[in-house]
Amino acid sequence: MLSTLGFRAAVLAIFSLGTLSAAGWTQADEPIELQGEYLKNTRGIQVAALDKNVYRVTTYQGGLPGEGWDKGPVQVVEVDQDELKDILEGASAVKRTSPTLGAKPPSAAIVLFDGTQASIDKHWASGAKLIEGDLLLAGCTTKNNFRDYRLHLEFRTPFVPKALGQGRGNSGVYHQGRYETQVLDSFGFDNEGNTCGAIYGVKPADFNACLPPLQWQTYDVEFTAARWDSDGKKISDAKLSVWLNGFPVHRNQNVPGSTTAAPVNENPSDGPLYLQDHGNPVGYRNIWLVPLDADQVARRPRIAGYERLAATSSTLADQQLSGRLLIGELGCISCHAPGKFGNVFEQKSAPVLEQVGSRLKAGYIASMLSDVHGNKLGTTMPDLLHGMNEQQRAQAAKSLAAYLESTGKSRKHSRSDAQAVARGKQLYEKIGCAVCHADADGSGLSATSVPLPNLAKKYSFDGLALFLKQPHDVRPSGRMPNMHLDDNEARDLTQFLLGAIDPSDAQPNTKFSVYEGNWDKLPDFKTLQPIASGTCEGFDLSVAGRTNNFAAKFESYVVLEQPTKVRFHLGSDDGSRLLVDGKKVVDVDGVHPHQTKSEEIQLAAGPHLVVVEYFQGGGEWTVDLQWESPLFVKQPIDGWLQLGPDQPRKTATEEESNPASIAEGKALFQSVGCVQCHAMKDTDKAASALAKAPSIDALKTDAGCLASQLPSGLPNYRLTALQKEAIIAALAVDPQGEISPEAHSKYTLAKLNCIACHQRNDWGGPESDKLDRFTSTIPEMGDEGRLPPRLTGVGDKLTDDYLNRVLSEGARHRPYMLVRMPKYGSATQGLAEHWKQADRPAQDSVAQAPDEAEIRTLASGRLLAGNKGLSCAQCHTFGNQRATGIQAINMLTMTERLRPEWFRRYMLEPTKYRPGTRMPASFPDGTSVLKSVYDGHADHQIAALWKYLSQGTQAAIPEGLQRDQIVLEPQDQPILYRNFLDGLSARGIAVGYPGGLNIAWDAQSMNLAKLWQGQFIDASMHWRDRGVGRQKPLGDLVLNYESRPAVAWLNDPAEAWPETNAVTKNYKFLGYKTDKSGHPTFRYKLSDTSIGADTIVGDRAELSVGPKDAPGLKRTLSFQVPKGATNAKLYVRLAEGSKIVQDGKNTWTVDDKYQITVAEAVASNAKVRDSANQKELLLPVLLQTANSTANTTVNAELEYYLRW
C-alpha cells in the first residue's frame, strides 16, 4: 500500500546542517558544514564527518542512492578538509527530504505521539520521556498491543562523528516488541545487516537510503503478524514491507523469529511497539498506526498506480489525485452520472463479455462470481451478490455463469510442450510481464503488483493466447497493454502461464491425416497416402510433427439445433480450404502470410461435416476457423466440434446451462447491475437496481458504497479505510477547478502503471525489488541499456508525431532493452498534449547552421558522426550497421524522434537531461572538443550533425563502420565500376580518380549524374552473394549534377532542352576509351534530323585541385560535328538550378552548391535562361571549320571547371 516516491531534491547554494544542531545532539566543536550529499557531473557524493579534520567520501556512479546510482561498486576514501574541498570543486550540494515527512494520520489511525505529553500519558508505558518540548526520546514501549498494522514515524539521529558502527546514533523500531527495523546513523557507510533500514539480523535494506544525522527521516512500515494454528504452532512467519525515506527497502520480507535481545519472545499473542534505547539520544515524532486485518486488506482493489501515488504521500493534492484515480478505475461513473464534475473523472471500460464463453473454461465463471475477491485478489470488480445468503449466492452465480457461457463454447486444450514452457517463462521474466505482475507462481506479490488469478482454471488455451496477443479486444481501456507478441510468443507465454496440462482434460473432437510433400498450392488429397493419422483437439498443426513441407486434412462435425445462416472465417499461413458437407465454402489457397477470407451459407438443423484442408511450405504455420450466425456471436469453432454426427454427452456444467438458467442469468445480469459496466446484446441498463444511483456530485460520503456497513444489494469493492478517504478527498475538490497538465500526466501514468518502468520528475520508476526484472542484451551499457528512459521533459524532447505514435502504438527502438514499450491504444489520449504544455520552454532555438552549401554541411555531419569526429558511431548503431563499441540507440531514428531544439541543448549538456548517461560531454563550456571542424563552433557542428542524420536511410555510412565493405581505392589510375548505382539507370558507370574525385556517368541518359569527393565506392553489395541492390557513393559532398545530356542541338536559343523521350530517340551510347593514364572518355552519338547527320560527343573528366587542396572537376567535351552545322545550333548546358548567379567575368554559382568556371574567351557567350520554373546556364559551341578532317566533319572542344 506504500509507494516509492523518491526524495524531493533541491539544489542549494550553500549546504550547512549547522542550523539543525541542538544541544545534546552533537559532539561539541565538530565540523559539519561539509557533511552531506552532492552531485557532480554523473556522480553522487556522500560526505560523512569522522573527526575534526577527517571525512569519509563515498562516490556513486550515476547519481545518489535511490536517485540515479547504477548499483555498481562505490569508491570510498578518507580525506582531510582541504582534500575534500578539492573533490567537491564544481559539485552542487543537495538536501533531500522524505516525501512522507509530516504525513497526516488518516481518520482510522491511532495517533501514538503527536508531540504532546498527553499523547505520551495515553499511549506509552511508564518511562517514556518528552524532550525539547515536542520529541519522544528513544527507550519507550506502547501500552497497547497490536497485530497487523501500517505504521508511520519520524526519527532524528544525533551527530557523533567519532563513534563507529553500532555506537553511531543507534536505536531501533521493534514491531510487536519482537522484530527490529534498525535505526542508525549509517549515512555514507556500507549497507549491512545491522545498518539503517535493515531488518536486524534478517536482511539488509535493498540499498542505503539513510540521510545525514540531524535530518528528520521517516519509516513507513506494513507489518503482518505471524500466524499460528489452534495448537499454538506457527504456520506463517511475520512479514515486513519497509519504506525508508520514501524508498522501498523491503517488500513482503519474511521474518523467521524475534530479533536477538528483543524484549518480547515470539508467540501467538499481539505485541507492543518498542523504540529501543541504545545509549544515543535518538528522537522521534509524528508516530501513528493504522490497525489492519491483513487477510481482509489483501482482498482490496489493488491498483498499482494508486498504491504508489497515494499511500506514502503527505500532500492533499496527491490524496485527491489518488481518489480521482480510484473513482475512474472502479468504474464509479458507470452508475453515478458525473454531474457537476463533467470530465474530471474518467471511466475505465469493463472487459468485453460478448465472447467470454469461448475464452474461459466452463465452471470458472460460477466459481469466480461466488467469491469475487477471494478468487481474484486485487480485482477492481465489485461483488454484486453482496448480502445474499450462501444458497442464494451459489444459485445466482450458476445462473449468471450459464448466461455468460452461452456466448460461446470452449473445450479445446493443448498438449504441454516443455520447450514452449521454457520459452514462455523467459518471455514473462524479460519483456515486462514480471514488472507489473507478481511471479507467475504467486511469489513476490507486492502492493504494486497486479495479482494473477489461477489462469489454468480460468482460461482455455486459445482463449488466453488470443487475449495475450490482442488484449484490447477484451480490455479496451489499455490497462493490459499490447506487448507486441507474435503468434509463437503468444502460444509460448500461454504454455508457461497455464503450466502442465492434465491429459485427462483432453477432448479429442477432430480426425486428422498428415501428408509429406512440397507444394505451392493444396494437393489432391485423394491421390496421397498419409504418413500419420488419428484424433486431436481442433485443428492442431502440431500433429504433423514438423514445421515445413507437409499437408493436413481435418474432419469433424458440428450440430445445429435450428436452421440458420452461418458466416465462416478461415485464415491460414500457407494455404487452406473449408468444405462443409462436401461443398467448398472458403478457399485461402496458395503460399502467403496469414490471410483470412469469409463466406456465408445457409445450414439446416442437425449435424454437418466440416473439413479443413491445409498445406505448409515454410515460415509461419497457422490455421484458424471462426464462425458466427444470428444464433451466436463470432467465435472459434473449436468448442463446437465433435468426432461424429451424434450429439456428444454434455458436461455437468452444460446440463445445468438450460434455456431457463440462461434466461435467469440474463435477468440477473441486468437486475444486480452487471449491465452497468458490461455492455451485452439485448440487455437494458434501465432494468438494473443501480440505474437510479445519484450523480457523483450528490453522493453522501458516509453512505452507499462508502458506508462503513455496506447495505445489501450494493456493489462491495472491499475498500480499505484509506481508499475511502482518498475517494472522499477527490469528491471534495472544486468541480470547476482547473487541473494542471502535470496533474493530468500524473493521473495517466498512474492509471496505466507507466511508473512501473518510467520515472517522471521525482516520482515513479522501477522499484528496488523489481530492478532485476530489467535486463539487457548488452550488460556493458549499464542501466541505460536495461531501464526504460525517464519521462522528465519528454514533451520537450520528442516530436509531436513521434510522441503520439509511441504512446498509442509503442516502439522498439532499443532492441538491446528486453523490457518492451507496449501499445496502449487510445488510453493515452491527451497525454502528449499535456506533456507538451508542461515541458516545452516558451522560447527555444535550434542550432545555428553554418553559411555554406548543403552538401558541405552534410559532409561535415558525416565526419562528426564517424571515428575521426565526435565518434558517435562508436556507441550508436547506424541503420543496420553495428557500432564499433556498445550498440546504443540507432542514430538514424534521432531526427525522427527528437525535436531539434532539444537535441541542441542535450548535445551541449547531456548529463543535465539524462543523469548518469555514458554520453560524453563533447561541448564543455559551449565549445567543441573537436577544433578542426568549424573551428570548434558548437552550434555549427550540432546543426551539421542534425542535417546529416536528417537524411535517414539516404545518409552515407559514417567513417569507421565499413567493417564488411570492399572499398575500391584508386591509386595510380582511375577505377571504373560498372554495376547498379543509386539514382542512375542500370547502365550507370562510376569512376574513381586518384586524389579524391569521383563521378557517376549514365550511359542510358548520356549525362554526368553524380560527383563526390573522398572515398570512391563499396563493392561488397555486388561482389558478394547475388549482388542485389543499388550502391551509393562511399564518400562525401555528393552532388547530383545532370539529369539529362549536357549537349544538344537547338533550333532556337529559347527551345526547351531535350526531355528523356527525346534522349532515347536521338542519342546513342558508343562506349568509352581510356588513355595511357587510364582516364576514360565516354562517347555517344547525337542525331540532328535538320542536317541529316550525326554528331559524336566525347566526355572526359579529370581531377582539378582547388583551394585548400580540395578536389574539383575539369571536364572536357569534344565534338565531331557534320559539315554544314552552324555555330548557333550546338549547345552545352553547363548547369541547371533554381538560382544561378554570375560571380565574375567567367564564374557562376548554382543554388549556392557549386561553381562553374569557363575560359574568359568564351564567357561572354554563356547565357542564363528561364526554363520550366528553373534556370539554365547555356554555352554555344564555337565550330572552327579550319579543324575539319576528311572534309566531312568539324572538330571542336570545350573545357570548363566545376567546384563544390
Image (tube, helix red, strand yellow):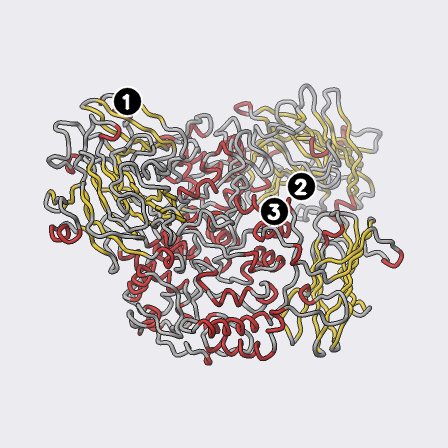
Q: Earlier in the sequence, mark 2 or mark 3?
A: 3
User: From the viewer's perspective, is 680 left or right of 588?
Assistant: left
Location of residue 355 in the rendering, given as x and y in whole percent from the top left corner: 59, 67
Which residue is painted at 51% across and 44% down in the image? 819
Q: Residues within 10 Å of mark 1 (few under 14, many from 20)?
A: some
Number of other residues with Cα within 10 Å of mark 2, as a class: few under 14, some 14 to 19, many 20 or more? some
- Tell me the kind of residue under disc 1: Glu
Residue that mark 3 sits on:
421
Count of marks, rendered view: 3
Q: Residue furthest right?
A: 527
Dot 2: element:
loop
951 and 877: which one is in front?
877
Between marks 1 and 2 in the image, the one whose residue lies nearer the viewer: 1
Q: Position of residue 847 (x, y in %)?
A: 42, 40
Assign a secondary structure to mark 3: helix
Q: Quadrant of the C terminus?
A: top right
Mark 3–mark 1 Cα distance, whole angstroms, equals 52 Å
Question: 16 or 533, which is in the foreground?
Answer: 533
Residue at mark 1 = 78
Q: Mark 3 vs mark 1: which is more N-terminal?
A: 1
Q: Position of residue 1099 (x, y in %)?
A: 72, 32
Is residue 1202 found left or right of 2 in the rendered image? right
The residue under label 2 is 983
Reply above or below: 540 against 46.
below
Q: Quadrant of the rendered structure where residue 91 is?
A: top left
**Mark 3: amino acid:** Val
Looking at the image, residue 756 sits to the left or right of residue 99; the answer is right
Neighbor class of circle 3 (other Cα within 10 Å; few <14, some 14-19, many 20+) is: many
Residue 984, by quadrant, is top right
Q: Earlier in the sequence, mark 1 or mark 2?
A: 1
Label 3 vs label 1, nearer the camera? 3
Calculate the distance from the C-alpha at mark 2 to the C-alpha at mark 3. Answer: 50 Å
